[in-house]
């Protein structure tokens, strides 16, 4: 792992960070910001479901930045640190709901070994989340994974970072220029 | 009508959220920007990432260039073809870490690729590699769960 940026900032006077480095490729930056905001504002899945999924990816992919970020709307829905502390490798034995455990299993199927995905899990999730919810979960996991790997391979991992609550992308408090991948 | 950059099984899974699927399509198209990284370089990387997943290259994104058959066969075995341009060899050296060992990627090949191609190419390459990997995983899971 590198905590030394491998590409400098594209924004004069600003340090290397996800948005300032991604600015070397403005189309990627803009389309990601548009998509990520739309994803978080869509309602096929709850903010809580998305945040639990994002944190699971952050911990499995060991994205130091992503795992320290918390998005505000999930907080406002009541998702607290005690619950997020349950999103470990032992989540199947944790006091999470069966639905949440299946969401985490599906997340693991994508970010772990896809060949181990269980068709029965897909059927159960389709019943619980609906086709749109399962589609949104699939997209979210892919975005969380992809952007975590971009952040890590660009060397943009922080050496240390406290838990930090940021406005949810796409929300009224969100400012794209300050937006990390999360 | 331009060809979709989202593999068929994954496009089917995302069909119930058409606006987000379209946004994803546009984001992927920006990542697979052959004006920033040559099409043949990205194509070699797509094929290597697919091979590392044991997947068909079509599962990981759109075909971006035609390659000589011997080269495609080497990449299908997750081998690096001989005689590649330096930037392509560096890109493949980076790509082989992405699916399963992204934290082990050393600085050297990234900095050397940046020296060859510049900042925009490096950002685009790393985004493309991450999304080849993500799309491949999403597609493999969608296919396994198809009909579930």
Image (spheres, coloured by chain):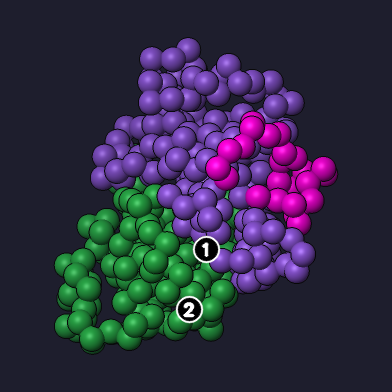
Chain colours: A purple, B green
- Residue range in magenta is A158-180
Label annotation for residue A146: none
A177 falls in the magenta region: yes
**B76 or B7: which is nearer to us?**
B76
Q: State the image coordinates of residue B148 (x, y, percent, origin top left).
A: 34, 39
Q: State the image coordinates of residue A125 (x, y, percent, origin top left).
A: 44, 32
Which chain contains the residue that carries disc 1? A
Tell me the element at label 1: loop
Q: State the image coordinates of residue B26 (x, y, percent, origin top left).
A: 59, 67
Residue that numbered label 2 is attached to: B115
- Main SS, magenta residues: loop
Q: Quadrant of the C terminus of chain A?
A: top right
Which chain contains the residue that carries disc 2? B
A83 falls in the magenta region: no
Query: Can residue B138 be seen here?
Result: no
Residue drawn at the location 29% of the way across and 36% of the way down: A118
| B144, above or below B130, in the image | above
Q: State the image coordinates of residue B66 (x, y, percent, origin top left).
A: 32, 85
Q: Are marks 1 and 2 in contact (CB under 8 Å)?
A: no
Residue that numbered label 1 is attached to: A6
Query: Can residue B53 be seen here?
Result: yes
**Horizontal side of residue A134 vs A12, given as left or right:** left
Residue drawn at the location 58% of the way across and 16% of the way down: A82
Residue drawn at the location 32% of the way across and 32% of the way down: A120
**Horizontal side of residue A152 vs B8, given as left or right:** right
Residue with the most extreme top position? A95
**Residue B93 image-quadrant placement:** bottom left
**A106 or B131: which is nearer to us?**
B131
Give neighbour class at mark 2: few <14, some 14-19, many 20+ (Cα, 10 Å). few
């Amino acid at each position: 792992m590198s905590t030394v940026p491998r590409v400098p900032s594209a924004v004069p006077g600003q340090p290397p960070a996800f948005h300032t480095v991604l600015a070397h490729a403005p189309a990627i930056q803009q389309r990601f910001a548009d998509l990520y905001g739309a994803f978080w504002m869509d309602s096929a899945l709850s903010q809580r479901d998305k945040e639990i999924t994002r944190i699971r990816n952050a911990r499995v992919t060991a994205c130091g930045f992503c795992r320290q970020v918390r998005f505000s709307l999930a907080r406002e829905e009541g998702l607290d640190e005690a619950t997020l502390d349950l999103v470990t490798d032992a989540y199947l034995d944790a006091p999470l709901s069966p639905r949440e455990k299946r969401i985490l299993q599906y997340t693991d199927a994508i970010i772990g070994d896809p060949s181990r995905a269980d068709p029965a899990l897909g059927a159960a999730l389709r019943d619980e989340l609906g086709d749109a919810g399962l589609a949104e979960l699939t997209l979210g996991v892919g975005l969380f994974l992809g952007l975590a790997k971009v952040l890590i391979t660009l060397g943009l991992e922080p050496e240390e970072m406290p838990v930090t609550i940021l406005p949810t992308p796409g929300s009224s408090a969100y400012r794209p220029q300050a937006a990390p991948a999360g | 009508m331009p060809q979709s950059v989202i593999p068929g099984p994954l496009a089917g899974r995302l069909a119930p959220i058409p606006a987000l699927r379209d946004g994803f399509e546009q984001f992927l198209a920006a990542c697979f920007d052959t004006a920033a990284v040559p099409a043949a370089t990205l194509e070699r990387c797509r094929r290597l990432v697919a091979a590392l997943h044991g997947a068909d290259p079509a599962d990981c994104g759109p075909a971006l260039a035609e390659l000589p058959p011997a080269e495609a066969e080497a990449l299908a075995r997750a081998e690096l073809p001989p005689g590649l341009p330096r930037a392509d060899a560096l890109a493949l050296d980076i790509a082989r870490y992405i699916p399963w060992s992204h934290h082990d990627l050393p600085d050297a090949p990234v900095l050397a690729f940046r020296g060859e191609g510049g900042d925009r190419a490096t950002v685009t390459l790393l985004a493309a590699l991450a999304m080849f990997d993500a799309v491949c995983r999403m597609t493999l899971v969608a296919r396994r769960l198809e009909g579930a």
